[in-house]
Amino acid sequence: MSLCKVCNLFAVMSKNRLLYTDLSLIPLFVAISFTGVVLHVAPFTTHDEWHNWAVAHIVAGALFLIAGIIHIKQHWLWYKALVKGFRNKSHITIALSFLFLFEVVTGILLLTVVEGGGSNIGYWHYIIGLAMLIVGLWHIIQRLKILTVWLK
C-alpha cells in the first residue's frame, strides 16, 4: 500500500471519529437539556421522583462531559489558533466553550461541595445551563449542513 493511500485511510478514519463524536453530542445535549429543565419545572410529588431525574441528569452530564472533552481535543488546533486572536473565529463557538467550562465547574461544585437546594451555585448552574441550551442549539444549527454532507 502506498504512502498516499495510508494517509488517505487515516484521514477518513479521523473524519469518521470526528463525525461520530459530533453526532453523539446531539442526543447527549438533548438528554442533559431535557433532564435539567425537568429538574427545575416539573411538579415532583416525592423526593425519589426528583432523585431519579437528578441521577439521569448527572449520568447524561458525565457522558456529555466525556464526549465534549473528546470533541474539544479533536478541535484543539482551532482552540490553539485563538491565541492569535478572535477575528476570524466563530463567536458562538467561543461563547459555547466558555459556557461549557462554567457549566462543568458549577456542576462539579454542586456534586462535591454544595449541600442542599437553593444555593447560589445551583442557581448559576441553572442560568448558565439555559444560556448553554440557547447557544448550543445555535451552534448545532450552524453545523447541520456540514453534518448532513458528512453523512452522505
Image (cartoon, rainbow, N blue to C red):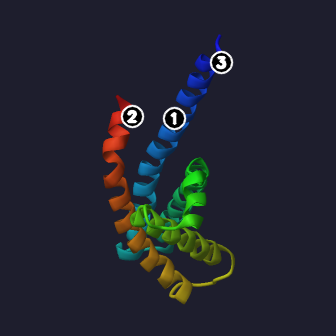
Residue position marked by numbered label 1 in the rendering? 15
Above or below, comparing residue 123 to residue 77 in the picture = below
Residue position marked by numbered label 2 in the rendering? 150
Q: How crowded is mark 2: few (under 14 residues within 10 Å), some or many (20 or more)?
A: few
Whichever of labels 2 and 1 marks the residue nearer the N terminus, that label is: 1
Residue drawn at 31 percent across, 43 percent down: 145
Residue 65 in percent (x, y) is at 58, 58
Q: Distance between the residues labelled 3 and 2?
A: 24 Å
Kindly check if marks 2 and 1 are in contact, taking CB atoms under 8 A apart as contact: yes
Kindly check if marks 3 and 1 are in contact, taking CB atoms under 8 A apart as contact: no
Tag on residue 43?
none
Q: Which residue in the rendered view is the most extreme toward the right?
A: 112
Residue drawn at 60 percent across, 49 percent down: 70
Residue drawn at 38 percent across, 69 percent down: 37
Disc 1 marks a residue whose amino acid type is Lys
Quarter of the image for residue 146 reads top left
Q: Residues within 10 Å of mark 1 (few under 14, many from 20)?
A: some
Looking at the image, is mark 3 or mark 2 nearer the viewer? Answer: 3
Disc 2 marks a residue whose amino acid type is Trp
Along the viewing direction, whichever of 17 and 48 lies nearer the viewer: 17
Disc 3 marks a residue whose amino acid type is Leu
